[in-house]
Image (cartoon, coloured by chain):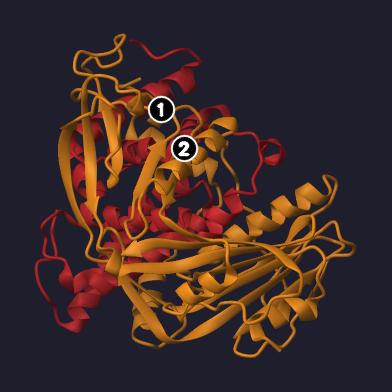
Chain colours: A red, B orange
Amino acid sequence: MSNVTGPDTAPGRDQRFISLVDQYQEPLLCMCCLCLCDKSLAEDAVQETFLRVYRTLDRFRGESSEKTWIMKIAMHVCYDINHTGWFRHTNRRLTPEMLADRVAAAPAAEQDDELAVAVMKLPRRLREVILLYYFQEMKVNEIADALNLSHSSVSGRLKRGRDKLKKMLEGREPDE
Amino acid sequence: MSNSLKPDEFRESVYRCFPGVKTDPFLAERIIASEKGETKMKKKISFSLAFVLVVLLVLAAAACAATVLNRQVNWQGEPVETEAPDWPEFPTEEEDENIGIMNSLADSVPDGDYAYARYDLPDTGYAKEHPKQKNFTSFEEFRQYMADWSYLTVPAWLPENVKTVSAKVILESRVNLEKDALEWELPENGIWSRDVTEAVYMPEDGEEGENSLDDWSTGGYYRKIEERKAGKDGKVEFTHYTLDDADAVVTGYNLVLGFEDRPDIEVLSNLDISIGESSFLVTTDETVSNPEVEGMSDVLLITAPGGDTKDRLFLHRNLESPVEYSDAGGLARRTTRESICIISYDREPDELIRIITGK
């Protein structure tokens, strides 16, 4: 995997950016869908992520892989979306009764899609590492770098996330 | 399951769940053009206003379960086609319980210090983060504090007979964040260090088999704060943040005014980090209008008949100069807009506008 290692001329910089968008837009979009559980928000998140990538492209020195760098930005963007003042405000007004109606109104997922649905139901921290590990195929140390976590924290979250998924998908307690 | 969770399967599952999701073939070109000032970025729904949609959904549901949410409008009150968010499962009682705990933790932090406390709810599929807040019960004290943060609009006028004032100022973004990972022993008395922000409880000998080795390495397990405070044995891994409160940035506030027997007016303001266009969900019996409000770039008033449903006034204000700061991850943030929302049951629209303009 190639890394951006220094300042470029403007055309070269733009070309490099276009290449990054071509390479990572699709996997990023899918990951943001699962992170945010909403298509429109995910599309916004991808746009915001690449906007930040473009603005900071010159400062990227290749200390991590491009993929790790971009995923790190994407996680920050998703975090931002979930933690604006509006979001906190709305959260305080959500009640289980209201949400039950909303969830019930949503179209039922196909059986084959239970995996993605189960991932969306994971706690955010577990969801993040599961997505990066399985969906983005990043290594544990890369995830640790992207999320500012220790190796053991990432491993722990992976294990717990996997156990939870197993429990949800198989309808039984995870193996001890 | 460890051997059956394949990336390809994962990806296909995602595509089936989000059948309409598609990449933008011109995204790179649009961003480049936007950054060079050639075009204006467009989006279907901004981040913050997507959340507003949820507010409206919830308010409408509370007012009348049978209400049909039949249209979305833009700032001009014109219909737009967007999709309402799909919500995953949400927590129930446990969240409220933990929010109380987190507020207690935040309250234990002396004024002037800042804590960012985080936790996972173990079984509800939801995580909550609690930033340090500045709380005020006096409008004058609130206004005085906000005088240092002129990019947020503070009410210029309050209706008469305000009985209670509850203001929360959000300090969630900071610069000069220092972070280092430490490993400490949990204090026997269970006292929390005030600047602990994240903790992972890791039993040394395993606990009922939960800490057994798996494919990767030793697992770490989150525990609810009560359990950690109870002083369970074992290593506790903390992520330790040192925050320079002098550089803390106010990013919003929530002001609730109470009259007689109930809170009636709520004023929210926050730095708007979103870009692009917005939309609002409006019920069949609501009307929309665009009154002029001095100093505001966008104004949308949504009124509902009777006193059982809240009226809502949404405002955008372009800041005189951009507000720039670095977030916790060191990424530069820049915003040029403030979002304001005023919600009320009983007040006339003119009163809601006067809260902002003073006139």
**The image quarter in which residue A149 lies:** top left
Q: Residue furthest right?
A: B306
| Residue B206 percent location from the top left of the image | 24, 14
Q: Residue at x 82, y 75 (%)?
A: B348
Within 10 angstroms of label 2, few (less than 14), some, or many (20 or more) residues?
A: some
Label 2 residue SS: helix
Mark drawn on residue B226:
1
Say whether disc 2 or disc 1 marks the residue closer to the N-terminus: 2
Position of residue B176 in the picture relative to residue B78 (left or right) = left
- Which of the chains bears the disc numbered 2? B
Is disc 2 in the same subunit as disc 1?
yes
Q: Which three-letter amino acid code belongs to the residue tagged 2?
A: Ile
User: Where is A109 relative to B21, above or below?
Assistant: above
Q: Residue at x 34, y 36 (%)?
A: A130
Mark linked to residue B101? 2
Q: Position of residue B350 (x, y in %)?
A: 78, 81
Give the answer, above or below, for where B77 lies relative to A39: below
Q: Position of residue A167 (x, y in %)?
A: 45, 19
Q: Are marks 2 and 1 in contact (CB under 8 Å)?
A: yes
